[in-house]
Amino acid sequence: MGRFVVNVIPGNVTFSLHARNGEPIATSLTFSSLSVAKRSVESVRRLAARTDVGLDDCSVRAKDPDAKPVKNPKFEIYKDKNGAFRFRLRARNGEVVLNSSSYTTKASCKNGIASVIKNAPDAELVILDQ
């Protein structure tokens, strides 16, 4: 089973999603409270369980002006400033709810997305107070 690990420092709450093997898959933005972070975790769970979440490959759209963006909710694949592949999960309102670490290949980035879909819906929630 995957796990959401929430790090609580007053005024600075984040979470990360870890795969069954313990490897981190992606991290959240920073939240002002634990309750807001928990709502975001639930949002990630719901989005990962949906079958209609799109995949928008921004690295292709950057090269093809005719490529159309995919509607939210969606996973976006993009290249960062160092040329590495990353993904982010956008909610229906367009807010980013999850960011990945970097991947050297697009295929491994897509595997990271598959890992979110596999691990997030039933991942346990672990809260670390500091």
Image (tube, helix red, strand yellow):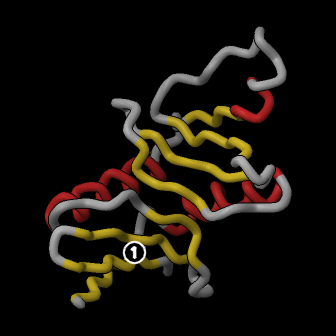
Q: Nearer the viewer, residue 1 or 21?
A: 21
Mark 1: give few (<14), some (14-19) or many (20+) Cα within 10 Å.
many
Corner quadrant of residue 37 = bottom left
Choose top left, top right, bottom left or bottom right for residue 9.
bottom left
Total marks placed = 1
- On the image, numbered disc 1 is attached to which residue? 4
On screen, residue 2 above or below 47: below
Q: Where residue 54 sits in the image (x, y, percent)?
A: 58, 34
In which image quadrant can residue 44 be found?
bottom left
Q: Residue at x 44, y 71 (%)?
A: 16
Query: Between 8 and 70, which is closer to the camera in this rendering?
Result: 8
Is residue 116 rendered to the left or right of residue 58? Answer: left
Point 46% across, 44% down: residue: 50
Tell me which residue sits at (53%, 41%) in the image.
51
Q: Tell me the element at label 1.
A: strand
Expressed as whole percent of the image width and height from the top left, the position of residue 30 reads 32, 61
Q: From the viewer's perspective, is 66 left or right of 48?
A: right
Q: Position of residue 123 (x, y in %)?
A: 42, 73
The residue type indicated by label 1 comes to Phe
Q: Is residue 46 left or right of residue 87?
A: left
Q: Nearer the viewer, residue 27 or 116?
A: 27
Q: Residue at x 80, y 50 (%)?
A: 83
Locate the C terminus and report the quarter of the image it occupies.
bottom left
Q: Is residue 8 left or right of residue 77?
A: left
Does residue 61 lie above or below 102 as drawn?
Answer: above
Q: Is residue 18 above or below residue 54?
A: below
